[in-house]
Amino acid sequence: MYLRSCCYSPPLAFFLVPNTILHRSWGKFFFSAADLLVGLFIRAILKLCRVPENLSMISVMAWLFNPFTFTIGTRGNCDTVSQLFVL
């Protein structure tokens, strides 16, 4: 059996424990939810900065419909979680 070594931080590894207990796709759902939260935070921050509505929606769509961020997040990369904490 091939074992992959992961370099997740201990808190992030704790959030991924249900991946072995509940369902093996738990991490994909976790990172996808973080991706959606980043889009929500982008919208909220731009609204606080009084950015026009159409530019705000274009910015959120640029994040959410970007195929690279979606693909990277569902493959197990935790970049979206760190971006969530930055926002």
Image (spheres, rainbow, N blue to C red):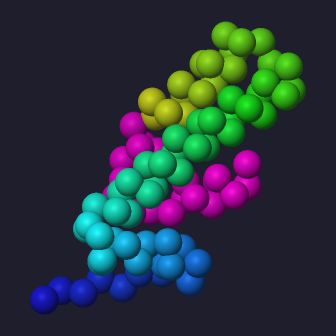
Looking at this rendering, what residue extends furthest in the right direction?
49
Rendering coords of residue 59 (x, y %):
63, 25
Q: Is residue 1 left or right of residue 66?
A: left
Q: Is residue 53 left or right of residue 72?
A: right
Rendering coords of residue 44 (x, y %):
74, 32
Is 72 included in the stretch rendered in magenta?
Answer: yes
Residue at 69% from the left image edge and 58% from the top image edge: 85
Which secondary structure dominates the residues rendered in magenta? helix
* Closer to the camera in the image, 20 or 3: 20
Is residue 72 visible in the rendered image? The answer is no
| Quadrant occupied by the N terminus | bottom left
Is 7 included in the stretch rendered in magenta?
Answer: no
In the figure, 7 relative to 49: above or below?
Answer: below
What span is in magenta?
67-87
Rendering coords of residue 9 (x, y %):
57, 80
In the figure, 1 relative to 76: above or below?
Answer: below
Residue at 59% from the left image edge and 36% from the top image edge: 39
Q: Is residue 58 left or right of residue 67?
A: right
Is residue 13 visible in the rendered image? The answer is yes
Image label count: 0
Residue at 36% from the left image edge and 57% from the top image edge: 28
* Closer to the camera in the image, 15 or 84: 15
Q: Is residue 68 left or right of residue 49?
A: left
In the figure, 52 relative to 70: above or below?
Answer: above
Residue at 64% from the left image edge and 54% from the top image edge: 83
Rendering coords of residue 20 (x, y %):
30, 77
